[in-house]
Image (cartoon, grey):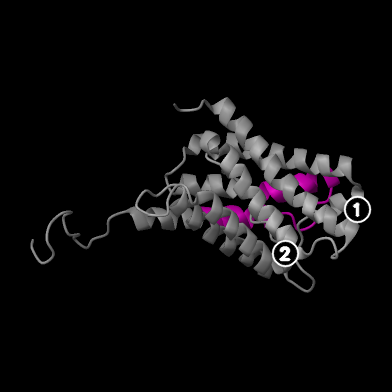
Amino acid sequence: MPVDLPRRLLAEALGSFGFFFIGFTGIAALTTEGSSAIEAVGVAAGFGFGLAAMIFALGHVCGGHFNPAVSAGLAAAKRFPVAEVPAYWAAQVVGGITAAGATRAIFNETVLHATLTLPGHGVSNGQAFTLEAIFTGLFLLVIATLAADDRAPWNGVFAPFGIGLFIFTAATTAGPISGGSFNPARSLGPAIVDGTWTNQWIYVVAPIAGGIIAGALNLAFRTPGPVLERIPDQPPGRP
């Protein structure tokens, strides 16, 4: 049965909190215990597998967006109601703020500051923006197929694995350069709690832009083109 909007929003907020808090705890371990306890790849695994876990737990309730760029991209792909996007954004940001607040309460201000998303050393704003937009766009294409396209044989049960694996891969490869957010709520939460806004516009604008562009591309892939297609169940070569 369809789940009403208030319960879906609660699931989005809770799932966003769990996703971010698992990743933030990995950052806390790296900050307080050093690389002998956990390395950067372990932090990436925390975000990737944390997202997969929350999709397993709550995806069937709310869709498992946990990311404003995903909600915007799926709306652009006509796979999610545009009217519900602002409410999902609010729930996701609340989850991010709660995760950042819990991180600050459990650890300290130094750990919270380490969760901020910033470009790597010597990386320009333009480079960070471009990488965040491209990787978020690719992420949206993965989601649109794994979670919302019945034509794909790997649609459905593989969604949490594939989606989490992409975030792990993106955080491992692009993260050290761009900051590895791909998610406005993940960046806004720590920025709001820490009161630090340096370069945060990158991590709001770039992911949403990348998600919307990829959503439009996904819609184009699903729209029949001008070439006449063979009628199903009709032998090849016959009109």
Residue where numbered disc 1 is placed:
110
- Is any part of residue 174 visible from this angle? no
Does 77 lie within the magenta span?
A: no
Residue at the front extreme of this rendering: 37
Give the amino acid type for the residue marked by disc 2 in the picture.
Val
Say which residue appears at 27% left-offset and 55% top-offset: 224
Relative to 54, is 82 on the left or the right? left
Residue at the left extreme of this rendering: 238
What quarter of the picture does the N terminus occupy? top left
Secondary-structure class at tag 1? helix
Across and down, in percent, residue 133 comes to 59, 61
Q: Earlier in the sequence, mark 1 or mark 2?
A: 2
Give the amino acid type for the residue marked by disc 1 in the picture.
Thr
Considering only vertical position in the picture, is 111 above or below 171? above
- Is any part of residue 238 visible from this angle? yes
Relative to 171, is 208 on the left or the right? left
Relative to 55, is 24 on the left or the right? right
Which mark, by number, is residue 202?
Answer: none
Say which residue appears at 79% left-offset and 48% top-offset: 191
Considering only vertical position in the picture, is 100 above or below 165? above
Secondary-structure class at tag 2? helix
Which mark, by number, is residue 41?
Answer: 2
Considering only vertical position in the picture, is 47 above or below 173? above
Across and down, in percent, residue 63 comes to 52, 40
Across and down, in percent, residue 70 comes to 55, 48
Which of pointers 1 and 2 indicates the residue nearer the eye?
2
Q: Nearer the viewer, residue 211 or 18?
A: 18
The span shown in magenta is: 183-212
Across and down, in percent, residue 228 comes to 18, 60
Say which residue appears at 89% left-offset and 46% top-offset: 107
